[in-house]
Amino acid sequence: MSGQARIDGLKFAREGGRLHGEIAVAALPRLEDVVSERSGVIVYTLAGSMNDQSKPVLDVAVEGALALTCQRCLERLDYDLRRRSRFVLVSSADALPDVGAEDPASETMAVDAVSDVADVVEQEVLLALPIAPMHAAGGCRANSEPSPEPTPSPFAVLGKLKKRAAGCRGEHD
Ligand SMILES: [Zn+2]
């Protein structure tokens, strides 16, 4: 196991730093309640740069395969996780912009909040996961559960056109 990786975000951005590695799912404590199996790894890439407004930014990419639990049939669901985020770094929480004043394409973070690499990766993984993961239509074992949705979804309408497949009726949002 590697030690706790830490970065100085401002320096990392100024120097165009790049960090690529893996963290075991088992080493990310906040994932414990989310995954059905604490196996596998999260592959991450951190890249620092200065944006066109000469502000320090940190690009974070995470990916990995996680074993979740389908909320419909309660069986294992293999989830391909992939997320990219861009953070504009500010030197302290006091310098965070007012809500609404932020650039919608990126999020502003205090530099202290990105210093612990495992913490940043863990946060990004949590944000990438669905709130209620479910198997795709046809891939789910639960086929007798009535759907709680009161109005027909576009998928349900589509389902009438097709022969009704056994299994889940798709995602509903
Ligand atoms: Zn399922």
Image: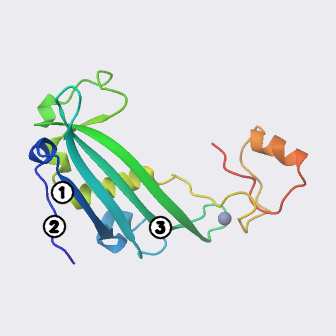
> Does residue 109 lie above or below 127 as drawn?
above
Along the polypeptide, which appears first: circle 3 or circle 1?
3
Inspect this view and state whether residue 83 appears. Answer: yes
Inspect this view and state whether residue 34 appears. Answer: no
Label placed on residue 134: none
Ligand 1's image quarter is: bottom right
Q: Which residue is mark 1?
A: 116
Q: Quadrant of the N terminus?
A: bottom left
Crowd tier of the residue under label 2, counting other residues whose Cα lies within 10 Å: few below 14, some 14–19, many 20 or above: few
**Residue 86 in the figure: left or right of residue 19:** right
Whole-number angstrom distance, CA of label 1 to CA of label 2:
7 Å
**Residue 77 in the figure: left or right of residue 73:** left
Along the polypeptide, which appears first: circle 3 or circle 2?
2
Element type at marker 2? loop
Residue 35 position within the rendered picture, expressed as x and y whole percent measured from the top left: 46, 68
Three-letter amino acid code of the residue under disc 1: Asp
Report which quarter residue 97 is drawn in: top left
Whole-number angstrom distance, CA of label 3 to CA of label 1:
22 Å
- The residue depicted at 13 percent of the width and 54 percent of the height is 7
Three-letter amino acid code of the residue under disc 2: Gln
Q: Which residue is mark 2?
A: 4
Crowd tier of the residue under label 3, counting other residues whose Cα lies within 10 Å: few below 14, some 14–19, many 20 or above: many
Element type at marker 1? loop
Q: Are marks 3 and 1 in contact (CB under 8 Å)?
A: no
The answer to whether the beta carbon of the residue marked 1 is less than 8 Å from any atom of ligand 1 is no
Q: Are marks 1 and 2 in contact (CB under 8 Å)?
A: yes
